[in-house]
Image (cartoon, helix red, strand yellow):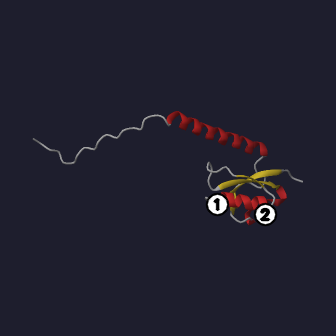
């Protein structure tokens, strides 16, 4: 028996969670990285069941090769996305107290001359 691997599948944007629920009901492992990668999700599938992925409601296409993505590679992706989220939060925390930039008043198209 071939090992299980992760596969990238498309979902209707904004409907990733519904597609993930359908995949989970059918016994697939699911990782939804939204909002980082909208429209995509990852399904953990045994090699002999990959043909069942496109048949799930809400799932469009399978984008990975038939051999899939090893578990260790997806683990690395999840760690990188987590770091990115933490960087966004840290950036927001560091900048939210800064004063807002004031806009310069517009110059009038009609200059008054004396």
State left or right for residue 27 relative to residue 17.
right
User: Is 113 located above or below residue 57 in the figure?
Assistant: above
Query: Residue 52: which disc?
Result: 2
Q: Residue at x 64, y 60 (%)?
A: 15
Image coordinates of residue 24 in percent, x first then y, are 77, 58
Question: What x and y, as percent, mark residue 14?
Answer: 61, 58
- Disc 1 + disc 2, Cβ < 8 Å: no
User: Which class describes the residues within 10 Å of circle 1: few (<14), some (14-19), or many (20+)?
Assistant: some
Residue closest to the eye, 55 or 13: 13
Which of the two marks, 1 or 2, is nearer to us in this view? 1
Residue at x 66%, y 57% (from the top left corner): 16
Q: Name the residue tied to disc 1.
A: 15
For image coordinates 62% across by 53% down, the residue present is: 38
Which disc is residue 76 wearing? none
Q: Is 104 left, or right, of 23 in this rendering?
A: left
The location of residue 9, given as percent across then percent down, is: 70, 57
Q: Quadrant of the C terminus?
A: top left
Q: Quadrant of the N terminus?
A: bottom right
Residue at the image point whose x is 29% and y is 42% from the top: 105
Q: Residue 107, position in %: x, y?
A: 25, 43
Question: With 100 as the anchor, is 49 left or right in this view?
Answer: right
Give the distance between the C-alpha atoms of the residues marked 1 and 2, in whole angstroms. Answer: 19 Å
Question: What secondary structure is marked by label 2?
Answer: helix
């Amino acid at each position: 028996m071939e090992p299980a691997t992760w596969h990238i599948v498309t979902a209707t944007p904004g409907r990733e969670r519904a597609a993930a629920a359908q995949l989970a009901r059918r016994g697939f492992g699911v990782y939804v990285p939204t909002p980082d990668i909208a429209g995509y999700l990852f399904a953990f599938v045994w090699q002999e069941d990959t043909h069942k992925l496109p048949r799930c409601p809400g799932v469009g296409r399978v984008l990975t090769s038939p051999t899939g993505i090893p578990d260790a590679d997806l683990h690395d992706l999840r760690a990188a996305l987590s770091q990115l989220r933490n960087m966004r939060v840290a950036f927001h925390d560091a900048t939210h107290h800064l004063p807002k930039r004031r806009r310069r008043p517009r110059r009038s198209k009609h200059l008054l001359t004396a």
